[in-house]
Amino acid sequence: MKKSRIGIVCYPTFGGSGVVATELGKALAQEGHQVHFITYSQPSRLDFLNENLFYHEVDFRSYPLFEYAPYELALASKMVSVVRNEKLDLLHVHYAIPHASAAYMARQILQTHGIRIPVVTTLHGTDITLVGRDPSYEPVVTFSINQSDGVTAVSDDLRKETLKNFPVTRDIEVIPNFIDLEKFKKQKKDHFRQAICPKDEALIVHTSNFREVKRVPDVIRVFYNIRQVIPAKLLLVGDGPERITAENLCRELHLTEDVRFLGKLEAVQEVLSVADLFLMPSEKESFGLAALEAMACEVPVISSDSGGLPELNIQGVTGFLSKVGDTADMTRKSLFVLDPNNLPSFRQKALERAREFDLTRILPLYEAFYEKIIAEVDQRGRK
C-alpha cells in the first residue's frame, strides 16, 4: 500500500477498542503512514510520538442551554477540520457509537467543499451486542454502518451477530484483533513472582474493566475452589463498577490474604509474565483481547465459550472453554491445566496460537482493506 494519511477516531481509554485503535495507529506510523488521532483526550496507549503520529483533541464545551455537551457535533467538526487541513486520505472510526454517525456527518459536510473522504468503521463488540441494540440508538447505528464505505468486525461471531440483529445491507470484513509480540512476551520477573508467591503457589490472573458482563465474581469463586485443592494466589488487574462486589466477596470467602487488586496498569505484560493461568469467564466477548495478551505471555486460558472466544481459545490446546457461569467446570479444567505435568504444554500452545495474531500478520490486512476502499471511493467519484 502506498503511504497514506489516515485519521483514526477512537475512545482514548483502556477498553479494547481504544487499545486496538491506538496500537494499530502506532504500527501504521512505523510503516511510514501519517496517522492522526482524533479524540477527546490523548489515548492511554499513545505512549510515544514520532514524525508520523499526530493527536488532535476534540474540544467540546458545556453551555447553560445544554444539559449534556454535544460531543458528536464537536467530533464531526474536528473531523472536518483535520481532513481539510491535513489532507487525509481516509477516516477509520473504531466503535460505532458515536464515531460512525459523526463520520457520516463530517463526510456530508466535506462534500460541500468538494472533498470525498472514505470512511471505514470497525465494530468491536458492545457497540453492536449491547449499546447498539438499544432502541434509542439502533436506527442511527444501522444507518451509519450502511453508509460507511467499508466495515470490519474483530471476529466472525461479531460479524454474524451484526448481520442477524441489524438490517445491514453491506459486506462486513473480518479482521481479528492482534498482538504485538515484541511488546507482549514472557519476561523474566523472578523477583516479582517470588514476592507474590513466596511458597511457589499457583498464580492466577484476571484483567478487565470490571463490568457486570465480565463476571468478576465468577473469577473469585473459581479461585476459591482452586485454593481448596492447591495453594494459589490471585491478581486482579483493572477497575470498574464490579470491583466493590468482588472485594466484598473476597472478604466473605476469607480470601483477602491471597487476592490482590492491582487497579489499572499500563504494563500488564509484566503481571502476565509471572502468571500460570488466565481466567476469563465473561458473559460475552466479541474477541477476547485480554486473553490473547495472556497467551502471548505463555499463559493458558480458562474462558467461557461465548462470542468470539472459541475463535481464539482452542479447547484442550491453549486452555479450555466452559459454559457461562459453570464455575465448577472451570475449576476442574483449571486444576488440570495447573498440573505440573500439563502446564508446560499448555504454555507452549498458547504462545503458538498467539503468534497467529501477531501484528505483522494483521497489519497488512488493514492496509489492503484501506487500499481497496480508497480505490472504490475514487472510482465512484470519477463516474
Image: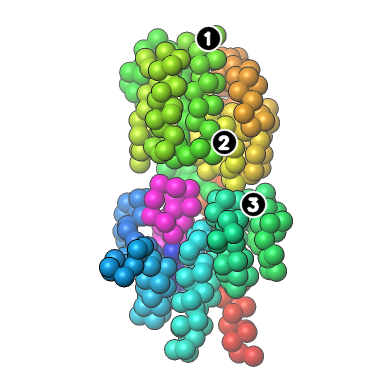
Q: Which residue is mark 1?
A: 228
Please state which of residues 46 and 49 is positioned toward the viewer in this rendering: 46
- Residue type for callout 1: Gln
What SS does tag 3 mark? helix
Residue shown at the point (60%, 73%) measured from the top left: 147
Q: Residues within 10 Å of mark 1 (few under 14, many from 20)?
A: few
Give the percent coordinates (x, y) of residue 348: 58, 29
Q: Are marks 1 and 3 in contact (CB under 8 Å)?
A: no
Q: Which residue is mark 2?
A: 282
| Earlier residue among tags 1 and 3 | 3
Please state which of residues 210 and 55 is positioned toward the viewer in this rendering: 210
| Quadrant of image for the N terminus | bottom right
Q: Which residues are magenta?
A: 10-32
Quadrant for residue 352, please give it.
top right
- Residue type for callout 2: Ser
Give the percent coordinates (x, y) of residue 33: 43, 67
